[in-house]
Image (cartoon, rainbow, N blue to C red):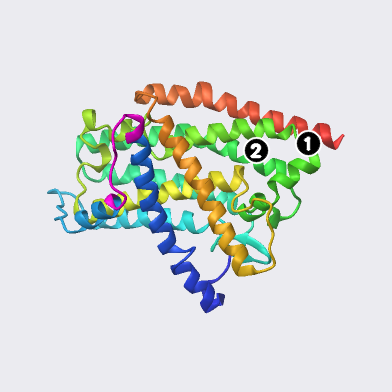
Amino acid sequence: MEDLREMSWIEILLMITVPGIIFIVVMSLFIDWLDRKVYARGQNRKGPPFLQPLYDIVKLTAKESIIPKGVSKFWMTALPIAFFATAVTGALMIPIAVFHEGVVAGFTTFPFDIFFVLFVLLSYGLLIYFMGIITKNPFAQTGSTRSLLQVLSFEIPLGFSLLVPILIVGGDKPADFTLSNVSASLFDSIGIQSLWLIIGLVIAFAVSIVVMMAELEEFPFDSPTAHTELADGWLVEYGGWRYALIHLGERIGAFFIGGLIVTLFLGGPYVGIVVESVVLMGFLNLIFFTLKLIAVIAVMSFLRTIISRIRIDQTVRLAWKIILPITIVALMLTIGIKLGVAV
């Protein structure tokens, strides 16, 4: 893993600005606006103004953050911070426009970082569970339990779907199993081996969109925070700056998971254009990645306008009885086609 002390001042500056933390936060607020706007249009509503997500964060930070009686102040403070930090860590791993050994990479890149991403996603879900449990509120605890069930149900289909592009690219060195290598080599690998590999990739991509909605607890998978049933679920006892930090962490999580889908299934920041200027190439990578991410978020937002909320038991059955078998089919197809090409 690249050590921060070995990074140049330019890399440190980029980590803070563009395409670093400031860019991630700005894009997360934009994602929030885009999601709400598309969802509103799907319901024949106007939707929020462009700066509404920023206004919401500023407004929340100015409000009082109350700690319920008998609840640990330390954990109600530490867990939202850890939640936010986990989302930022995942987002910084997404290869956007930072060059590492001539390849676009994330700020934190290392061999087998693809599998570390699964750990980050699981940590993201576990933190949601603990944030609700420690409040001792029955609504929050019920929402946390639902959230944990949902995360654990979709974690295996998510892992199998991510294996499809990894298998397509392949490799025999640890450096081959990185997000940056998969995004850079995916379409070239399909062209070299067999165009039939696209079948498994498309199926896994469709599954990943559904899993993304479940991981982010977006409609119709919003039973952990159902307003009509649980009064905001695991979030019910959080307010003020703590709620603002959690909300921003959720939006950064959308950037992270959406960026992961773009990286593994849509070629990340690549579109086949190569220019000599490193600065111009980095700028183009940033633009291409952003456009692909906007497309993924727009599709997800549109889907949730046409599907009604499903119960947690229906969510679990969907994950195990439908999503998981479909993902296994995509995985087996990819393995079979690769073996056929090898023979």
Identify the main secondary structure in magenta: loop
Residue 285, x across and y down, in percent: 58, 58
Identify which residue is drawn at 47% across, 55% down. Answer: 91
Q: Mark 1 falls on what kind of element?
A: loop
Q: Nearer the viewer, mark 2 or mark 1?
A: 1
The disc, 2 or 1, on the residue closer to the chain's N-terminal end is 2
Which residue is at the front of the view, 118 or 194?
A: 194
Residue type at numbered disc 1: Ser
| Residue 320 drawn above or below residue 148 | above
Specify whether residue 47 is painted magenta: yes
The stretch in magenta equals 40-52
Identify which residue is drawn at 14% across, 48% down. Answer: 68
Mark 2 = which residue?
164
Q: Which mark is residue 92?
A: none
Q: Residues within 10 Å of mark 1 (few under 14, many from 20)?
A: some
Could you say which quadrant of the image residue 34 lies in? top left
Q: CA distance from mark 2 to mark 1?
A: 14 Å
